[in-house]
Amino acid sequence: MRQEVKKVIVEICQKAKVASAQLAKASAEQRNKALCSMADCLERSCAQILEANKTDVEAARAKGVKEALIDRLILDKKRVNSMADNLREVAELPDAVGEIVKTWTRPNGLIIGLLRVPLGVIGIIYESRPNVTSEASGVCIKSGNAIILRGGSDAINSNMAIGNSLREALEQSGLNKDIIQVVPVTERSYAEKLMTMREYIDVLIPRGGANLIKTVVEKSTVPVIETGTGNCHIYVEGDADLTRAIDIVINAKCQRPGVCNAAEKLLVHQSVAKQFLPKVVSALNLNGVEVRACEKTMQLLPNLKPAVEEDWGTEYLDLIIAIKIVENIDEAIAHINKYGTNHSESILTADFNKALQFINEVDSAAVYWNASTRFTDGNQFGLGAEIGISTQKLHARGPMSIQQLTTTKFFILGRGHIRQ
Amino acid sequence: MRQEVKKVIVEICQKAKVASAQLAKASAEQRNKALCSMADCLERSCAQILEANKTDVEAARAKGVKEALIDRLILDKKRVNSMADNLREVAELPDAVGEIVKTWTRPNGLIIGLLRVPLGVIGIIYESRPNVTSEASGVCIKSGNAIILRGGSDAINSNMAIGNSLREALEQSGLNKDIIQVVPVTERSYAEKLMTMREYIDVLIPRGGANLIKTVVEKSTVPVIETGTGNCHIYVEGDADLTRAIDIVINAKCQRPGVCNAAEKLLVHQSVAKQFLPKVVSALNLNGVEVRACEKTMQLLPNLKPAVEEDWGTEYLDLIIAIKIVENIDEAIAHINKYGTNHSESILTADFNKALQFINEVDSAAVYWNASTRFTDGNQFGLGAEIGISTQKLHARGPMSIQQLTTTKFFILGRGHIRQ
């Protein structure tokens, strides 16, 4: 059994490595054409994809999977078309590969340059949403990388159908179909083997819940980019525009509560707590949000549910928010750096110095002044499609788009130079 | 016991995290002053450092450690002065922290920027050379990072003495002395605990032999940057200037054979093998180099020692080279990508197209055209002091200097912006 797992995974990895070397030689034009042909092929194979998806959805329902998760799993013609449109949009994005980032000449005449190149092979380990199969493939091919996809068991038939359609398109475009490979077995041992393939895989990106990410971080010897957990904070200073503050809090909490850049915590300066909290709590309640409150907030609004220690570190991904009154900006920053997940935080204030302190001292990928945290997103930042939002500091931080899936190499041009 | 290990390591990590937050607020002037005061303090405590080093050297001799390793371990007044000078040079380098890399405005008026900031806490796990204690500390403080140093047991007394001197200087400069911490116990369990401190340490950089690096890569949950293993190749094309080629091969192999950018393999196009190999082998022999040869080379020069399969993957770090005759550039590139360590490789050719193919297709951090591989080094590239040479693709590739020890964060300035 263990031998079989190893054989399957090593074979996938070896094929991916060969395919990535071939893709690295393809021109931007070839890559963009392949993306468009992948889009066409997805639309052409819509019936097969929906058929496979139906099998997954029925199996999930039979297993008693929650409807919220079924909704993430389910595909229809509109969703397949939107996957295809996403690939066409990626084809339109500017290219990153092959850029000469800079060159300089050393005193001895040696010319040194930095060339942007693909990473090579990217592994994605993800949960139920089958559209990730096509979106991640698109961004990887745009940036010249081969991709190995290991999706969740609930979506295996959908993922295989989408993968087969994309591979067919690659072949028709004259590229190696192994640029995209879906691991056909979802048993855990296969994913774990994949995490040890450092010789073949250049980076592993987990996309999904906190547990999935934790497992990959702990078990992988392949470099991992941690993504997506967002326990995001909004801090309202004493001099904030309180009317705007309510709009921002409601937007950050309610516009799409199930995503990583939604606000989960509200910190309020003690000087405006009495004035601001009743208003914001009533607006939150009107929007169906459950409010959990710190002790000081409970004194002002005794009907709220008290927050417990665990609340401060929790990403609810739901219509729930916890509120804490703080003495000053230092306490707010310390609280965020202690309990946050280094994703997105916002300060609402009129004071430049306070905004600057917050931007400098809050240790997160995206730090806002007077805006909703909901903008942390590749498209909203103007970077184009993204493969995830990195919450670690190495390699890429924040939304990862085409450029973040590349690396550089030094090239050195001499005329017989030797070191003295 | 295990509780004790955990307590010691967690305490060091917590102190480092606090110190790094304080250092992040220090100005470039304060950091540079601290570096100069560290240099002065090292020179002032020279006697204590040499005394501690003597203990280490005696213990190593008693244990029967090889003289080559003793030479790496041993300090004298000149070496201590050179450590101090290195710190003064680092102080003179341009600053990286606080740079606004770029800003742009979105159609909705949101201003987005990218700010360069320190990584936070850097862990270094290294072997016998005690000067790493001071060099790594210098580069980390320059880039605004706290550092945790875990050196080898052979150098523990030297490392502690150097660390104490540097910490004293930090305190005198008004900075937190915990910016630099040397793990006082060299037992393996302490290093292994350090490798799990993902909550506190932002990156772990192993510096040393292949085994050390492999262990850290396999055991660490903290992001690792793999450094330093260099099985470097020189490929001589059919149209290369063969006189220059001999100079380059001799320089790359012999100028300093024990370092990672020294050439370990020579690949020669079959069309010039007969003409070139006797000359280069005789020059290598004159320089005391043992030559190991592929089968085809053995046919030309039957007195050489035959190379075995293992040779192609070995970093000798010694006056040994293995030679292989290849049919063409494609075979050369495939061989390098199969057996190399993605460090530094050079093609010697007059042909621009071949050079371009080599630069594009060889998957290494530094790819040379008509020059010795010995230039892969932060100072030689004009980047300043380095903390190691990354052979992986994530975050940093090639020599890592000040900028590679930083990350960026997005800052987003709004006027009450909410997402539509």
Image (spheres, coloured by chain):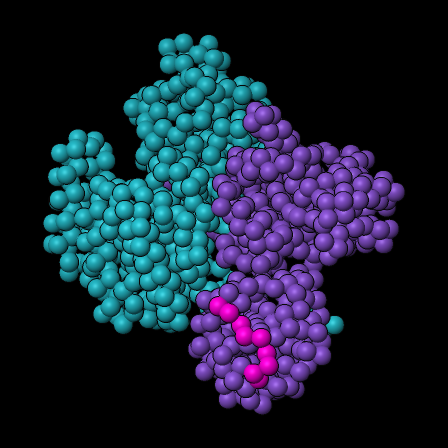
Chain colours: A cyan, B purple
For residue A276, say whether it is visible: no
Task: Give the dominant element type of the magenta stretch: helix, strand or loop.
Answer: loop
The quadrant where residue B152 appears: top right
Left or right of residue B21: residue A399: left
Residue in front for this viewpoint, B383 or A76: B383
Q: Position of residue B415 (x, y in %)?
A: 47, 39
Look at the picture and state if B327 lies above or below B32.
below
In the rendered image, the quadrant that contains the C terminus of chain A is bottom right
Q: Read off the magenta span.
A: B301-309
**What residue lies at 23% left-to-right and 35% top-to-bottom?**
A69
Residue in front for this viewpoint, B267 or A211: B267
Q: Position of residue A209 (x, y in %)?
A: 35, 36
For residue B396, say whether it is visible: yes
Look at the picture and state if B308 lies above or below A123.
below
Look at the picture and state if B265 lies above or below B420.
below
Farthest residue, direction front: B303
Residue in front for this viewpoint, A408 or A193: A193
Left or right of residue A204: residue B178: right
Q: Position of residue A324 (x, y in %)?
A: 48, 20
Does B51 lie within the magenta span?
Answer: no
Q: How many marks?
A: 0
Q: Position of residue A181 (x, y in %)?
A: 29, 57
Residue in front for this viewpoint, B49 or B144: B49
